[in-house]
Amino acid sequence: MINPFKYVQQVRNEVSKIVWPTRKETMTTTIMVFIMSALVALFFFIIDTITSNILDIILKLSS
């Protein structure tokens, strides 16, 4: 069993090793995530529209 005081010391020691991103890096990454999300959404919208139109054509031919 570990001493709670020793555990807290170890946690503080490990947390001090963390390299946090700068504000600029965080903003750049956030903007890139939004851009990539929009591009992926646009891609799936286009694929969905094309697939829907093809299915409508196929179903109208079989009627």
Image (cartoon, rainbow, N blue to C red):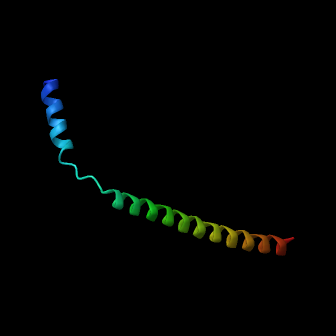
Residue 13 seen: yes
* Position of residue 41 measured from the top left corner of the image (x, y, whole percent): 58, 64
Viewer-side residue, 62 vs 33: 33
Q: Residue at x 14, y 26 (%)?
A: 5
Residue 38 relative to residue 3: left or right = right
Q: Residue placed farthest to the right in the image?
A: 63
Residue 2 seen: no
47 up-or-down from 8: above or below: below
Give residue 60's quadrant in the image: bottom right
Residue 60 relative to residue 18: left or right = right
Give residue 30's quadrant in the image: bottom left
* Position of residue 61 measured from the top left corner of the image (x, y, whole percent): 83, 75
Q: Residue at x 60, y 68 (%)?
A: 42
Q: Residue at x 18, y 37 (%)?
A: 12
Residue 24 relative to residue 44: left or right = left
Q: Residue placed farthest to the front in the image?
A: 23
* Position of residue 63 measured from the top left corner of the image (x, y, whole percent): 87, 70
Residue 49 relative to residue 36: left or right = right
Q: Quadrant of the N terminus?
A: top left
Viewer-side residue, 48 vs 16: 16
The number of numbered badges drawn on the structure is: 0
Q: Residue at x 72, y 68 (%)?
A: 52
53 up-or-down from 13: above or below: below
30 up-or-down from 3: above or below: below
Give residue 6's quadrant in the image: top left
* Position of residue 21 measured from the top left corner of the image (x, y, whole percent): 30, 56
